[in-house]
Image (cartoon, rainbow, N blue to C red):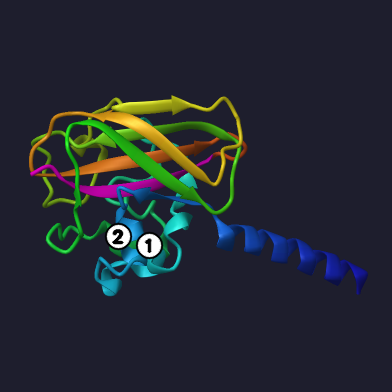
Amino acid sequence: MKKHIIITAVLASLFSASVLAHGYVTKPASRATNCKLNNNPPEMCGHAKWEPQSIETLSGFPGGKFPPDGSLASGGIERFIPLDLVKDKIWTKEKVKPGKMDFEWTLTVVHSTRNWRYYITKQDWNHEVPLNREAFESEPFCYFEDYGRVPPYTVTHQCEVPERKGYQIIYAVWEIADTPNSFYQVIDADFN
């Protein structure tokens, strides 16, 4: 009986940690945040409507295999797959201008952090195919090293956004130091 109680307690704590997990971009609002705010059609959001903070998978963007190409918005996680839909007309776009801009993360569980990175699509990316590494510049336009520090529950980065026109994607990555994972957020950006 004691063994059953201990196993149940361990499983419950693991489950609660994953349900509480972990962080998402609120300014400018990411695709997942816009799902939470009902700015994107609920049927296109999957579980992002309730869990914008849970798009977490193995680290590996841009040089590795995770998240897999075609599943960058969902992290390849089944309950978030609708976020990968190639329907740019449905996604709410955030007004973005080149130059200094703040990016704000809201964290629901803090983690020892390796770094924060922001990538942007190439000017001529093809937004009619599933989002893949080829669409993005290979180097982040903004990078913050955290050396394993634990961040506060709200993190703001001031970045120098490069010149772009029209519809672009900003891909925000929060790489964790105490797990092999990262959190991924797609920001649909309108540079008009």
User: Residue visible at 48% across and 36% down?
Assistant: 175
Residue 111 position within the rendered picture, expressed as x and y whole percent measured from the top left: 59, 42
**Mark 1 nearby-residue class (10 Å; few <14, some 14–19, many ≥20):** many
User: Residue visible at 8% across and 38% down?
Assistant: 165
Q: Which mark is residue 83?
A: 2
Residue underneath mark 1? 80
User: Residue visible at 21% across and 36% down?
Assistant: 134
**What secondary structure predominates along the stretch shown in magenta?**
strand
Query: Magenta segment, which residues?
Result: 181-192
Residue 50 position within the rendered picture, expressed as x and y whole percent measured from the top left: 44, 68
Please give the count of numbered marks on the rendered protein: 2
Q: Spatial distance from mark 1 to mark 2, Cα to Cα?
A: 6 Å
Type of the residue with mark 2: Leu
Looking at the rendered structure, the secondary structure element under dot 2 is helix
| Residue 34 is one of the magenta-drawn residues | no
**Residue 62 in view (yes/no):** no
